[in-house]
Image (cartoon, helix red, strand yellow):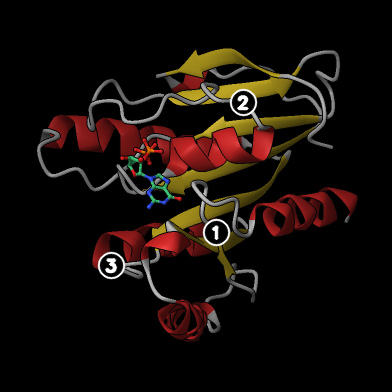
Amino acid sequence: LFEGPWDFVWASTKIDDLPTMVGHEIAFAGRSNVGKSSLINAITRRNALARTSHTPGRTQQLNFFRQVGHDERLTIVDMPGYGYAAVGRDKVAAWTNLIHEYLRGRSNLMRVYVLIDARHGIKDVDGAVLETLDKAAVSYQVVLTKGDAIKKADQQFMLEATYDEIKRRPAAFPEVLLTSSDKGLGIPELRAAIGRVLAE
Ligand code: GDP
């Protein structure tokens, strides 16, 4: 599923600007700096597909990636990072609106992967996003990032603590994954999880 090169195909800042739905779509969401770009690059094996370490809060857009030669198979969507305090209120409202519209109308969206920093766990701002996904009845799975930055014992603790927080949420897939883009931890497992969703 992830063999072969991926390409950036489209960026949307407005809801009337989304690419036509083809095949299945999965999306990645998370706070600015959570390691979203790094994780997308790790699962697609492309070093600079999603730009890493960009200035947080720059132009908020939905970025669409597809595999060269397999345009109809899978689209990966990089959702704008949230929770960056310095972004103005107007901008927050604009992209919250874009996200709501996107989630509401995207019938080929199979699952949203909500990334959570393994060092911090689920914060209020993340909880609000999970709430939005529950309300929109969009299936999502929580993925811990930067797992290498905490000790083994803490990894297990964080997995269990995070699971406790999502287990009663209606749209949450009842399994939390721990990953590290830097160390390749959990990347095969995440790819396999995505493969299972698409095979459903
Ligand atoms: P984004 O803003 O969510 O797209 O995050 P980036 O992928 O740009 O990463 C933000 C910062 O976290 C950068 O300084 C990365 O080097 C760092 N980072 C990303 N992934 C990992 C990881 O697996 N482990 C560690 N320790 N740091 C990471």
- Give the CA distance from mark 3 to mark 1: 18 Å
User: x, y percentage for residue 25?
Assistant: 70, 36
Precedes in sequence: disc 3 or disc 1 = 3
User: x, y percentage for residue 185?
Assistant: 59, 58
The residue that label 3 is drawn on is 123
The vertical placement of 74 against 175, above or below, is above
Q: Which residue is drawn at the image coordinates 28% and 30% (left, top)?
A: 94
The vertical placement of 73 against 137, above or below, is above
- What kind of element bears circle 1? loop
Q: Looking at the image, which residue sits at the far right?
A: 199
Of residues 104 and 72, which is closer to you in this image?
72
- Give the CA distance from mark 2 to mark 1: 17 Å
Q: Which amino acid does label 3 sit on?
A: Lys
* Of marks 2 and 3, the one in the foreground: 2
Q: Which residue is drawn at the image coordinates 37% and 62% (left, top)?
A: 149
Q: In which quarter of the image is the C terminus?
A: bottom right
The residue that label 1 is drawn on is 179
Q: In which quarter of the image is the N terminus?
A: top right
The residue that label 2 is drawn on is 46
- What kind of element bears circle 2? loop
Q: Can the viewer see residue 16?
A: yes
Count of marks overlaid on the render: 3
The vertical placement of 40 against 6, above or below, is below
